[in-house]
Amino acid sequence: MLYTSLNNYGAILHPAPTLFNIGRIENGHSYTHYIEGITPSIANFLEKLDYERITLGKYFKIRLKPLNVWLSDTYGSKGDNLYDLLHNTHAYRKILGPDTLQHRYIVEDTLNGLVPFVHLARKCGIGLPITENLTNLIGHLLNIDVISLGRDLNDMGIASMDVNQILDYVTNGD
């Protein structure tokens, strides 16, 4: 459960670039999400966001693949950084960016991806400032309380457990 949740690369690759391309989206401009929508600065931001995801995984004794490694392993992408890897991922070349903020790239991947990261980090007593700030900003732009509406520890059935109990639960099912 935790491994698959924390390996949600969509939560890294979708909400932030969508948010950062809000001008294009609201002005009706079509663009390719991974090529035109992710600039070197946005890719750098995504690397920091991914680092927080990996850090969270360590608290649950999960060794997560960095996004850079996953792209290389999955698609055979080449490059020295996330920007280069994305631009060398043939499968991503023609994927268009969202044409609305109500798209799954921002709504679903925030409510079911970023929000659980925030709740799990709070359970561990750690901060994920980039993840939390991004999540809150998306909530303000969508005019919804994403932290309250998103998947939380109650939804996962682990709200009353401490970190060690969660580890035991996901390992042994008890």
Image (tube, rainbow, N blue to C red):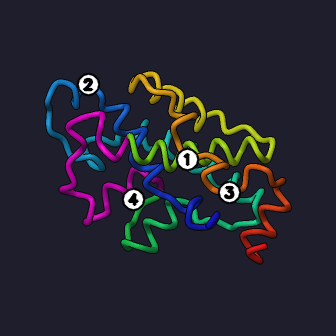
Density class for disc 3 (Cα within 10 Å; few <14, some 14-19, many ≥20) is: few
Q: Residue at x 77, y 61 (%)?
A: 166
Choose mark 4 or mark 2, whichever is in front.
2
The numbered mark, 3 or 2, whose residue comes first in the sequence reads 2
| Secondary element at image label 2 | helix
Dominant SS of magenta comes to: loop
List x then y, in percent, for residue 61.
77, 65
| Secondary element at image label 3 | loop
- Residue 151 got which mark? 1
The numbered mark, 1 or 2, whose residue comes first in the sequence reads 2
- Residue 157 got which mark? 3
- The type of residue carrying mark 1 is Arg
- Give the answer, above or below, for where 137 lies relative to 81: above
Q: Which residue is mark 4?
A: 85
- The quarter holding residue 29 reads top left
Q: Residue at x 30, y 32 (%)?
A: 21
List x then y, in percent, for residue 148.
57, 34
- The type of residue carrying mark 3 is Gly
- Give the answer, above or below, for where 49 lies relative to 93: above
Choose mark 4 or mark 1, whichever is in front.
1
The quadrant of the image that shows the N terminus is bottom right
Assess whether residue 31 is covered by the magenta stretch: no
Choose mark 1 or mark 2, whichever is in front.
1
- The type of residue carrying mark 4 is Leu
Q: Is residue 48 left or right of residue 73?
A: right
The numbered mark, 3 or 4, whose residue comes first in the sequence reads 4
Labelled pair 4, 1 in contact (Cβ < 8 Å): no
User: Cα distance, mark 3 to mark 2?
Assistant: 39 Å
- The type of residue carrying mark 2 is Gly
Give the residues drawn in magenta, as a range.
81-106
